[in-house]
Amino acid sequence: MRTYSEEFHVMITAIGRSNARKLPEYPSIESYSGRFRHASEWDPIFNPQGKSFTVIGNGASGIEEVANLQKMASRLNHYARSPTWIAGSFAGEGEGRKFKPSYHLPETLRSFENSTVYLEFRKKFEGNSYGRFETMLRDSEGNKQLRKEFKTSMAEWTKDEPELLEHLLPNFVAQLQMTHSWTRISRGLVQRNVDYIRTPIAEYKIDEIVTTDRVERKVEEVICCTGANTDKLPPFAITVPGNGCLQDAWTPDPYTYLGVAVPCFPNLVFNQGSNGTCFRGTVPNQIETQKTYFALLLREAASQRHSALRKPHFEHNCMVTSK
């Protein structure tokens, strides 16, 4: 590996908050002879047709993997430690998630060359994501109504297997923990070649997974949809002489100004950093807003000949920590 150094005035990290995949640890995993990998390591030339699969994880990627693999797998076991809410869409936008992409007509794309037309489209499409704040409040009427809507939706696509609904419905309040927008896709959970398993995994054998009730299930491929790092740290060290390392500064919790900057780490800014987003809104708008802020910040620094972007430039009294 070649080592080299370069110098810059400002460093902007844009690798995302969850940037290091996390694999589960199980007893005897080394004895398993099949393929064991994280969903983010998908092999594009791999052919899943006719194989038996295990999908571990019940988040957005787990539900998506089950739905897509179910159509090709001979057998699919979905291990879900915890249930989760599955909604039609996050804020009522469009038709919700589905298998195939939703393409715009050529004339619609051409109309976006007019910035006014494009802005109106964005406002109309994303507008619902900036409302219904009451649904974020525990025991509010809005949250109770949302829970009712989610439960009705999930009951509809499990109507042929009503006993499955009891295992799918979570106890936590809707919207206060992760809610996934996969209603159409999640119908893969009720297909005949899919088993939804809540019993914890006890161990692995050569070609089997054994659960704590001692049931053994053969499997050729294991796909782990088990998320990524939760510490929000970049996968490389960021050090300021005399101030220390970011990995130490963010232990036990990240400490930032709106997810954009860190005290005592001048000229370092984050795009979509820790604490940088709220519960409502859309990711494209959040990224655009932060990049616009970066541009204004760097323009001011250049015009005023600031040698370093320090805490006065980021309003240190607005620093927030994650809990």
Image (cartoon, grey):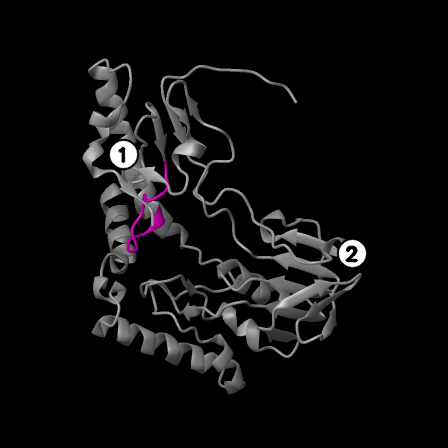
What amino acid is found at the position of numbered circle 2 in the picture? Ser
**Region of the chain picked out in magenta, as a range:** 271-283
Dot 2 surroundings within 10 Å: few (below 14), some, or many (20 or more)?
A: few
Which mark is on residue 250?
Answer: none
Which mark is on residue 292?
Answer: 1
Q: Position of residue 30 (x, y in %)?
A: 75, 53
Q: Position of residue 69 (x, y in %)?
A: 63, 64
Q: Is residue 22 above or below residue 266?
A: below
The residue identified by callout 2 is 31
Question: Can residue 287 be spotted in the picture?
Answer: yes
Q: Quadrant of the N terminus?
A: top right
Dot 1 surroundings within 10 Å: few (below 14), some, or many (20 or more)?
A: few
For residue 283, side relative to residue 57 (left or right): left
Question: Can residue 112 be spotted in the picture?
Answer: no
Q: Is residue 291 magenta?
A: no
Q: Position of residue 34 (x, y in %)?
A: 76, 57
